[in-house]
Image (cartoon, rainbow, N blue to C red):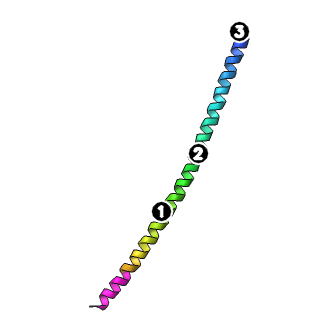
Amino acid sequence: MVATAKFRQMAQWIGLAICGLIVSTAFGMLGILLGIIMEIVNGVFRVAIGIIVAILSTIAFFGFILWLFTL
């Protein structure tokens, strides 16, 4: 009887350890996936900001050239 109770308790501990491992693996995979998505979004924002800065710099450069022609 005692051996059966110890076997059941050990099986419960092993099951709990396996469930914990599955949950931690799932959260780890989710963290990796979210990290990849965040890097993609940050890259898109960096490219968009770079394009906006390039356009504004071009406008400022040609505005400066036109201003020089008026002197």
70 inside magenta stretch: yes
Secondary element type, mark 2: helix
Circle on res. 2: 3
Magenta span of residues: 61-71
Q: How many marks?
A: 3
- Residue at image mark 2: 30
Determine the residue located farthest toward the left in the rendered image.
Answer: 71
Q: Residues within 10 Å of mark 1 (few under 14, many from 20)?
A: few
Q: Image quadrant for the C terminus?
A: bottom left
Question: Which tag is nearer the camera, tag 1 or tag 3?
Answer: 1
Are the residues flagged by discs 1 and 2 in contact, CB closer than 8 Å? no
Q: Earlier in the sequence, mark 1 or mark 3?
A: 3
Q: Is residue 39 left or right of residue 7?
A: left
Residue 35: percent from left, percent from top: 54, 51
Q: Quadrant of residue 8?
A: top right
Residue 69: percent from left, percent from top: 31, 91
- Residue at image mark 1: 45
Q: Is residue 29 left or right of residue 54?
A: right
Circle on res. 53: none
Q: Is residue 14 above or below residue 43?
A: above
Residue flagged by tag 1: what amino acid is it?
Phe
Residue flagged by tag 2: what amino acid is it?
Leu
Inter-mark Cα distance, 2 to 3 = 42 Å
Residue at position x 55%, y 49% from top? 34
